[in-house]
Image: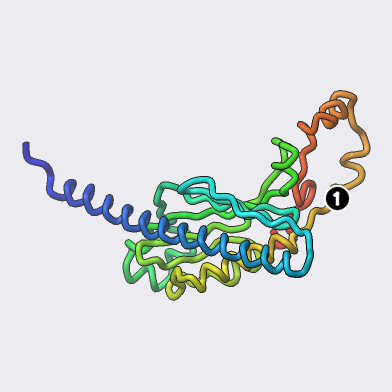
Amino acid sequence: MELNQNLTNLVFEKNELKQEAFNATRDAFALFRNTSQQIIDRLSALRDESGRTTQLAFTDRGDFEFEVTFASDVLIFLMHTNVFEFSRDHQVMKSPYIREDSKRSYCGVIHIYNFLADSFTYQREADLGYLIGRVFVNRESHYFIEGKRELGMLFNNFGTSTITPQSVQQIVESAIEYTTNFDLLTPPYDEIKVVSVGEMRANFDKKSMVTGKRLGFRFQSDTD
């Protein structure tokens, strides 16, 4: 049986391209994991030296997930197991870096989510988390970030930014800084002034108390 040569080349070349992007993203994720643990270890040492009591923890949850806890916040880092390409309308597709070689647009993705630590401590399943950034990594270990404030503005040069221990440390520190400054705000009074008996009883069980940093609000930077 003879196969179409173009089909054969397409299947093999596309698979190799995606595998290279996946491997680069997996290596980047390992660096994020190691760097995050080192940052928490260093903060813990400084906390102990100063006699402070701030909650700090690093939790590894397998090959594609880990979390960092600091004070009242948790950052969860998740690596997607698939490789993606951007739509033709995406701004990154217009960059000279991609126009020079379209294969560079295939990327793995690392998501960074922010949750309240109490949401996990008290098992408030309905609480909300926020995607504060997603890191795109291609087969050449070039990256850029779509995200809020510090993350989105500082790390968006796909053509020149590469994954290194220094760049990963800067990303993680910026994520912690942004999260720390992203405060929990009370929802508007008129939205919570009336509550049913059923809702109040459910709240006593801590199962229906939906809490999020901007519940009833938009991100302050959503108009950017």
Q: Position of residue 92 (x, y in %)?
A: 46, 65
Q: In percent of the image, x 45 and y 48: which residue is there? A: 63
Of the 4 image quadrants, the one containing the N terminus is top left
Q: Nearer the viewer, residue 131 or 42?
A: 42
On screen, 50 above or below 128? below
Q: Quadrant of residue 142?
A: bottom left
Q: In percent of the image, x 11 and y 42: which residue is there? A: 3
Of the 4 image quadrants, the one containing the C terminus is bottom right
Q: Which residue is mark 1?
A: 186
Q: Quadrant of residue 88?
A: bottom left
Q: Find numbered disc 1 in the image and state the secondary structure of the residue it sits on.
A: loop
Q: In percent of the image, x 61 and y 63: which residue is there? A: 41
Name the kind of residue labelled 1 in the image: Thr
Q: Position of residue 117 (x, y in %)?
A: 72, 48
How many labels, in total?
1
Q: In the figure, is residue 32 to the left or right of 126?
A: left
